[in-house]
Image (spheres, rainbow, N blue to C red):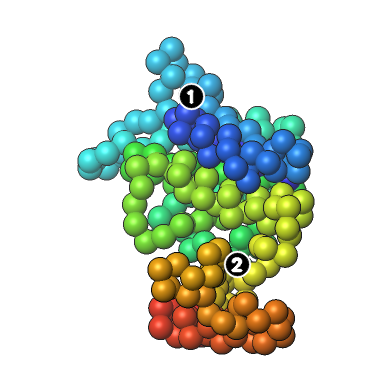
């Protein structure tokens, strides 16, 4: 998979892809992540990528010209399955979407800033808009990192134990059950006996029941 992320502040994306599972996927060459500085496509000496909004109002708007030039440059070198704009009014990210996007080959992510991007980019270049929640961030970089993480960890080979991703919360529409590790008894706080029994079938049944119960209590809308 190739992910190209367009950003006004690419420095914000250096850390997420330099550690842990994402770095492992990159090091294994299972995914290629490129951070593109939008200011490299500005046409003036000040590297301007934003301007005042037509019609007035507070806040600046990201200009069409540098964004269009950047996307067109990328498309001249590669065919993309999706060009995604991270936006608070986009389609809400969930596990089903992450599963689907993880199967793609080439993706562009555009990080918004200020009051957003010129609508003509959304109308004529963007193929999908994604939100990570009903709130506003200072920019789309953190959202892009979240989306990329959700996608990359599902690529076969990125996680050493691939069955681990299949048992994550939401994969079966339920929250994950509680988990425990050593010691079995910590100052009287004990691990449920069933998990120490060695009876795999009974353990899986218990976990499924716990998942249903936890989902009913915490996220009943998922059921």
Instruction: Looking at this view, name the residue that lies furthest to the left.
Output: 57
Q: Nearer the viewer, residue 113 or 119?
A: 113
Q: Can the viewer see residue 77 in this picture?
A: yes
Instruction: Find disc 2 in the rendering and name its residue.
Output: 168
- Residue 16 image position (x, y, % from top left): 53, 39
Question: In which quadrant is the N terminus drawn?
Answer: top right
Q: Could you tell me how far apart the alpha carbons at marks 2 and 1 are, in whole angstroms?
A: 38 Å
Q: Nearer the viewer, residue 17 or 128?
A: 17
The numbered dot on residue 39 is 1
The numbered dot on residue 159 is none
Quadrant housing residue 12:
top left
Residue located 31% across and 36% down the image: 60
Of callouts 2 and 1, the N-terminal one: 1
Q: Is residue 171 left or right of residue 10?
A: right
Q: Is residue 35 above or below residue 108?
A: above
Q: Nearer the viewer, mark 2 or mark 1?
A: 2
Q: Can the viewer see residue 2 in this picture?
A: no
Residue located 56% across and 87% down the image: 209
């Amino acid at each position: 998979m190739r992910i190209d992320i367009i950003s006004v502040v690419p420095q914000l994306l250096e850390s997420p892809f330099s550690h842990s599972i994402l770095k492992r996927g990159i090091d294994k060459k299972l995914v290629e992540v490129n951070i593109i500085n939008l200011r490299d496509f500005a046409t003036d000496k000040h590297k301007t990528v934003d301007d005042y909004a037509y019609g007035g109002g507070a806040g600046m708007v990201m200009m069409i010209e540098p964004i269009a030039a950047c996307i067109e440059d990328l498309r001249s070198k590669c065919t993309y399955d999706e060009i995604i704009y991270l936006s608070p009014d986009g389609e809400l990210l969930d596990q089903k979407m992450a599963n689907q996007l993880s199967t793609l080959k080439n993706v562009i992510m555009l990080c918004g800033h200020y009051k957003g991007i010129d609508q003509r980019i959304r109308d004529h270049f963007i193929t999908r808009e994604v939100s990570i929640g009903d709130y506003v961030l200072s920019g789309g970089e953190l959202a892009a990192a979240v989306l990329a993480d959700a996608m990359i960890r599902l690529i076969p080979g990125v996680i050493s134990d691939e069955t681990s991703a299949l048992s994550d919360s939401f994969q079966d529409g339920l929250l994950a059950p509680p988990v425990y590790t050593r010691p079995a008894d910590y100052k009287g706080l004990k691990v449920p006996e069933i998990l120490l029994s060695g009876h795999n079938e009974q353990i899986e049944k218990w976990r499924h029941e716990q998942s249903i119960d936890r989902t009913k209590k915490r996220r009943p809308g998922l059921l």
